[in-house]
Amino acid sequence: GQSLEQPSEVTAVEGAIVQINCTYQTSGFYGLSWYQQHDGGAPTFLSYNGLDGLEETGRFSSFLSRSDSYGYLLLQELQMKDSASYFCAVRDRWQAGTALIFGKGTTLSVSS
Amino acid sequence: NAGVTQTPKFRVLKTGQSMTLLCAQDMNHEYMYWYRQDPGMGLRLIHYSVGEGTTAKGEVPDGYNVSRLKKQNFLLGLESAAPSQTSVYFCASRQTGTSEPYEQYFGPGTRLTVT
């Protein structure tokens, strides 16, 4: 079967750097995505890694190591507005319709 | 562009009642999905569609039915609601093709309570 593991909660202060890890177990792995969801809102796409290495988008970076079945989301220069839940998700090659399998989410709380 | 819209936003049902959730997208996406989100459980796929007139089961399909009569609409039906179906329901869509990053666009959600 497929499974993703990520920490349930992370806390940090404004201006800090935080890393949210994700380990996955799936067959026919295609890529790792990250989504952000503010309380009461819809998930929104943040980043995608199809190949090993680091992808950078402004203050956010995402990393993937396919050999280790591991990835992380790195958030720099944290702001209060970054307080949200972050989900890693995999696109499984054998999942028809290219649906995503989501982790249970990491709640990030940023304090001043 | 409105993106992905969902109606209704909130609904309270009594056990045994039926209802239909409507998802609409104006991005001409082929793929559409219905997820449910429960506290601490992440998003779980209920049903999906890879095109007009096609539907398929996801991870947690029991108690739900879907229809995709028009490309832009994806309906989720609950024939006989149960308290276990109390959840937040999200619809999502995606463009076709093999180009990355396979981003899914989500609607604002429908908060359903079954008493």
Image: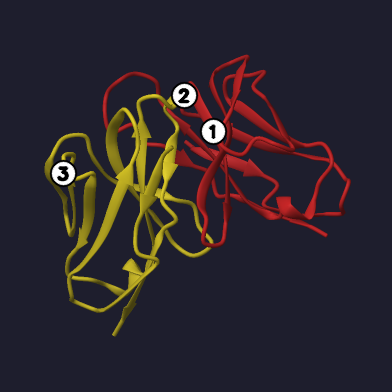
Image quadrant occupied by the N terminus of chain A: top left
Q: Amino acid at mark 3?
A: Ser
Tint applied to chain A in the drawing = yellow
Q: Nearer the viewer, residue B114 or A64?
A: A64
Give me the chain letter of mark 1.
B
Secondary element under disc 1, as helix, strand or loop, is: strand
Please give the name of the residue rendered at 17% of the width and 70% of the height, measured from the top-left corner.
Answer: A17
Which residue in the protein does label 2 denote?
A97
Q: Which quarter of the picture shows residue A91? A: top left
Indicate the amino acid at tag 1: Tyr
Above or below for B37 versus A112:
above
Front disc: 3 or 1 = 3
Q: Determine which residue is flagged by label 3.
A: A65
Q: Quadrant of the C terminus of chain A?
A: bottom left
Q: In the displayed image of the protein, which residue is found farthest to the left? A: A53
* Same subunit, tags 1 and 2: no
Residue at position x 70%, y 36% in the image: B62
Q: Is residue A72 left or right of B83 when viewed as pictured?
A: left
Q: Position of residue B41 (x, y in %)?
A: 52, 56
Q: Position of residue A15 (x, y in %)?
A: 18, 76
The residue that mark 1 highlights is: B33
Residue at left offset 46%, top offset 28%: B27
Label 2 chain ID: A
